[in-house]
């Protein structure tokens, strides 16, 4: 694993940190010596993570669709550490729903979970961000390759790219950087259980420039870079961590 000494002792907040890519990022930032606050709905998965690690890891059960819970969680992290160095808006859902069957309620709920939560978290974090702070918003390869039955998901993820670009402009004068990570298809536990059949694996290996499947820990490495001052020149950017899929 790469070492970013500037991350030691930094305060890092991660949404959806109990599973998948979020969990890999919690582990990676904690390994760097950062003080990590993560939230999730899945308290059971979170407890296996906190129990396996030492001090410097703090979990709060939060439903990101509930604004007051998000603001309370951000305030908690900021109060304990006085400043937020890295905020990672990671949590999302990716339901497959044919467009003709999509209800307005499903559309609104997905925007609330995937996009509105990122706005609320960033706004709540604002008073605690300063020169050198970094916000990392999670979008997706799907904005580029537009799979079927993911219209609402892709729309939320395109919105996140707009949020990133606009916020980078607005927060730039304060020295705050805002970037997007758009992962390719990542082999999380849930993706492997629900979607990644042998046929899908074959397809991924065909469309990526480099055939090897992407692991959650590799996306965490991209997040470490964006959280560290090593990426000080980057803001308003989308980093496509997709082994070249969108390039094909
Ligand atoms: N895995 C992939 O292939 C892939 C590809 C492209 C983009 N992404 C993006 O990467 C990010 C992480 O994806 P993942 O695959 O690790 O997801 P995941 O489903 O494995 O984990 C998401 C976590 O977020 C939590 N969460 C969801 N809704 C929540 C809510 N309302 N309140 C609190 N917690 C909530 C879940 O409980 C879960 O622990 C997402 O933004 C996703 O859209 C993932």
Image (cartoon, rainbow, N blue to C red):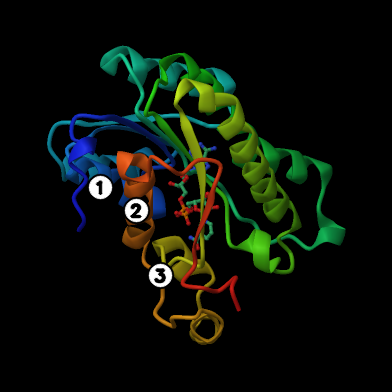
User: Tags 2 and 1 in contact by the CB under 8 Å rule?
Assistant: yes
Q: Is residue 147 left or right of residue 136?
A: right
Mark 2–mark 1 Cα distance, whole angstroms, equals 9 Å
Mark 1–mark 3 Cα distance, whole angstroms, equals 17 Å
Q: Is mark 3 within 8 Å of ligand 1?
A: yes
On the image, the x and y values in percent for residue 26 come to: 30, 44
Mark 2–mark 3 Cα distance, whole angstroms, equals 11 Å
User: Is residue 204 visible to us here?
Assistant: yes
On the image, the x and y values in percent for residue 232 come to: 38, 40
Q: Is residue 224 left or right of residue 193?
A: left
Element assignment for label 3: loop
Q: Is residue 96 left or right of residue 136?
A: right
Q: Which residue is mark 1?
A: 27
Identify the disc placed on residue 220: 2
Point 45% across, 16% down: residue: 72
Q: Is residue 125 left or right of residue 123?
A: left
Point 33% across, 12% down: residue: 79
Element assignment for label 1: helix
On the image, the x and y values in percent for residue 41 come to: 45, 37
Viewport quadrant of the C terminus: bottom right
Rendering quarter of residue 170: top right
Identify the disc placed on residue 206: none
Point 18% across, 45% down: residue: 31
Q: Earlier in the sequence, mark 2 or mark 1?
A: 1
Identify the disc placed on residue 214: 3
Rendering quarter of residue 99: bottom right
């Amino acid at each position: 694993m790469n070492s970013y000494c500037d991350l030691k002792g930094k305060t890092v907040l991660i949404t959806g940190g109990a599973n998948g890519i979020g969990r890999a990022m919690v582990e990676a930032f904690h390994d760097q010596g950062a003080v990590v606050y993560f939230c999730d709905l899945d308290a059971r998965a979170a407890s296996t993570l906190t129990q396996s690690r030492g001090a410097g890891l703090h979990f709060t059960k939060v439903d990101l669709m509930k604004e007051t819970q998000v603001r309370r969680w951000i305030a908690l992290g900021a109060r304990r550490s006085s400043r937020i160095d890295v905020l990672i808006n990671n949590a999302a859902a990716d339901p497959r729903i044919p467009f003709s069957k999509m209800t307005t309620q499903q559309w609104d709920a997905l925007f609330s979970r995937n996009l509105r939560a990122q706005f609320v978290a960033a706004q709540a974090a604002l008073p605690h961000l300063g020169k050198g702070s970094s916000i990392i918003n999670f979008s997706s390869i799907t904005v580029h390759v537009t799979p079927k039955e993911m219209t609402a998901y892709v729309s939320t993820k395109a919105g996140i790219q707009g949020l990133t670009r606009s916020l980078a402009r607005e927060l730039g004068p304060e020295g705050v950087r805002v970037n997007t990570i758009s992962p390719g298809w990542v082999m999380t536990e849930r993706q492997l259980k629900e979607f990644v059949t042998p046929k899908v694996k074959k397809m991924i290996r065909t469309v990526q420039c480099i055939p090897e499947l992407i692991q959650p820990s590799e996306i965490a490495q991209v997040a470490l870079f964006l959280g560290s001052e090593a990426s000080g020149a980057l803001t308003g950017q989308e980093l496509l961590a997709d082994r070249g899929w969108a390039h094909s």
